Amino acid sequence: MLDTLRFILNDALNLGFAYGLLALGIFISYRLLDFADLTAEGSFTLGGAFVAALIFNGANPFLATLLSIVVGFVAGIITGLLHTKLKIPSLLSGIITMTALFSINMILMGIGKTGKFDSAVYLGNSKTIYDYIGIFKQKYLNIIVVNFLVITLATMFCYWLFGTEFGMSLRATGMNQKMARAQGINTSFMIIIGLGISNALISLSGALTAQTNQSADCNMGVGTLVIGLASIIVGEAIFGKRSFLNWIISVALGSVLYYLIIGIAINLGLDSYLLKLLYAILIIIVLTAPFIKKGFMKLKRKES
Amino acid sequence: MKFIKKIVVCMLLLCCAFTFTACNKDDKIKIGILQSATHSALDAAREGFMKALEDAGYDDTKVTYDFENPEGNPANMQLMAKTLVRKCDIVLGIATDAAVALKVAAETEGTNIPVLFTAVTDAVDASLVESNEHPNGRVTGTSDINPVADQIALAKQLKQDLKKVGILYTISETNSKVQADMAIEEIEKEGLEYLERTVTGVTDIQQTLKKLISDGAEIIYIPTDNNLAKNMVSVCNIANESKIPVICGKENMVKAGGLITFGVNYTKLGEMVGAMAVQIIEGADPKDLPVGRLSQDECNLVINTSTVSILGIEIPSEIMEKATKVTTE
Amino acid sequence: MMLKIENITKEFNLTGAVEDRRIALDHVSLDIHDGDFVTIIGGNGSGKSTLMNIIAGAFPPDSGKVYIDGEDVTKLTEYKRAKYLGRVFQDPNMGTAPNMSIEENMELAYRRDQKKTLRWGFKKEHRKKFIESLTSLNLGLETRLSQKVGLLSGGQRQAVTLLMATFRKPKVLLLDEHTAALDPKTAKKVLELTDNIVREQKLTTIMITHNMRDALKYGNRLIMLHHGHIIFDVEGEDKNKLTPEDLLRKFDELENQDEEEVIQTEEVNENKCD
């Protein structure tokens, strides 16, 4: 039984850290920039398809992973440009990029194969970044270590970035565009770069996931937007957002918590079609917890 | 302080949840089945698998099953694969993505568990085995590779002066593309012209099919494509209206209105991999078991007589005699 | 000449129906000298807000030019023009970023005229200056630097916005009915604050207000807009002599003129029909 507990914890850490990058990325667009960015599902798959295609064709996995950050950044910039320069509404801008990425991902996954496209890449025995880290004997522990390092670096980077002049201006843009412009901030530029950074993180998340699963396919991004948002909400509710540092850590850890809950559910033998109902119930519990707490404290005061 | 309190609460909750997860202390063999999604063909394979084991004497006094079905959700697929690989003695992946997830999970967890697969079209392409004859690892199974050559040969038998064959499949399904490529090869071998078109989902089926017909396809071939199989009724309505025969990849597509198929019997495929499971339980090494596939005799020739009357075509007597006849459900 | 507005015209809804087309500003020209404190009044639709938005660069005029301290800024976008201007809006929520602290907001204002680099945004040297200015407000805000601005009251937020607008001396201070959304007591406080700051820093200021008493009490120059024209422009002694009743009479005159125009147009239309 203790074994099961350990396994669930391992899985939650493994997946949670990788998806934590996704949560951070979505946090930047949804919470900081107040921009409902639907590009996420496309850029997650982009990161995975890109890295898998490169590794499949013999590239160095570390280089491929680093480059996946760049392609994600570009995807975000495109959405930003569509919205700021072509005045396309934000939701639609994200959808347009995401749709275009579907085709691009198919083309990427076909590189080095006989067709012009493919819908999946299987990495089989190609080496991923996890194969180069030999700290532990068991591979899954190595994956956790690497993912932990990456999410920690990403979180530190975000904390630093949003404390700089540039970062503050970006946050101001998300809160109040008119006021930001009145303070001399180029809001268009902020949105473009902000979306770029957001999707760069999401793409990196996809790249790590593809290497963990040793495969990438055109549907790997499905549902990631919901996972990201749910992670943010769960993280904020449980760990709070009293300071910016607190907030950002809560978001990064939210994914771990999210996968902990799912892991428990699966191990309890819950049928998979019931899982969705479980998430809904959990989110309700998590969001109403503060009200229940207040009610509880009121009762206590009445008694005393 | 509040922060720490919250972590403690979470941990406590976890431990409570744990008291409910039973530890399986008995000696029964644990078999894990990871099925990619609910689907009649995949369900049939699963049932065939379990039946084969039971027939060989492995009933519920000797084995317990653990089913997981992520219904296509990628993240859940990974979690479920890991769970099964840890808990079970042998696992079966139904469909390519489930099989790959199990293989990767087994390698990552560092266990030596044998991984079986079924309903995978090209196991080499999916990196499940090194080659179909010599898998060379802990993974083996049965492939649902269709007798595409035979299916295309049917086309010529149905229409002697056939010139153009249309191929329709969903772009995101790897298995479909593999079969489509094989079909193209066969069509060209027969000296015919092919017209290949793809759909991305449900919304573009009608228009793409109509374009295929207006471009001159005289017979259309649709491989074992999950998306098109689900929407077979609307596909057939359009094709039958234009009097275009549809050669399908599998039986349930014919039942929905397609004309004919040389179909893979998924139950038999499941039974085959069940037999392999028995061999492994009794000591065989997966790397010595070549990937199985159905022979032509084990494939069902199925024809839909209602469709025959709608199309108003004549079916050669050799086919009519051999075929299992169905009507549209 | 600190601010020169030359022949500005702005129409709205040009592509719409004839009845919906509005000429907000009609060939308006205005010269504002360094140190002028101008109050602008006018009825609804007179063009006051449009004028302010055009000075700030929120949208471009259809024709005409805007010069700030001799520089032609007509083509500069809103955020590029921000370095010359300080702005306080009518809505207290508009001037600050609610989820950021007072300190962060002031840091933003401090860098209004600078490029936003990757240097760390919080500077210790700035803190002292912020505390000094906040102390002068007498609102107790100097001890609440790290508090989120969203938690402050409307009046406090406007005070902070005012501070942010004037912290780095702007060439022109634009106040768009900035006390209209506050209760009378707080409005008075904020206006007094405004007056003090403008006097101390000798700021060129334009203040839109719909309160005629305030329009007369503050500033050295008063402008009245009507239907996109400047119809009244007094300063110095002439302004001091005016009373609110004088202004009200002026408004009545204009309303009567409008009514006559409407009646005349109706008569013309009736004649057409006969």
Image (cartoon, grey):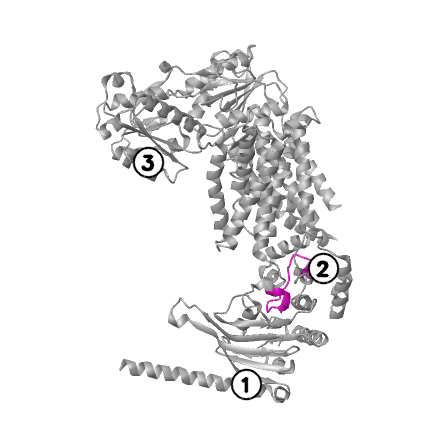
Mark 1 and mark 2 in contact (Cβ < 8 Å)? no
Q: Residue furthest top?
A: B283
- Residue that mark 2 sits on: C103
Q: Are marks 3 and 1 in contact (CB under 8 Å)?
A: no
> Magenta region: which residues?
C81-108
Q: Is residue A90 above or below residue B259?
A: below
Is residue C97 part of the magenta span, yes or no? yes
Residue at point 73%, 58% (across, down) = C146
* Mark linked to residue B209: 3
C204 and A42: which is toward the camera:
C204
| Residue underneath mark 1 | C248
Chain ID of residue with mark 3: B
Q: Residues within 10 Å of mark 1 (few under 14, many from 20)?
A: few
Which of C176 and C173 lies nearest the eye of the viewer? Answer: C173
At label 1, which amino acid type do we have?
Answer: Leu
Q: Secondary structure at mark 1?
A: helix
Crowding near the residue tagged with mark 3, few <14, some 14–19, many ≥20 C-alpha atoms within 10 Å: many
Disc 3 element: helix
| Residue type highlighted by circle 2 | Glu
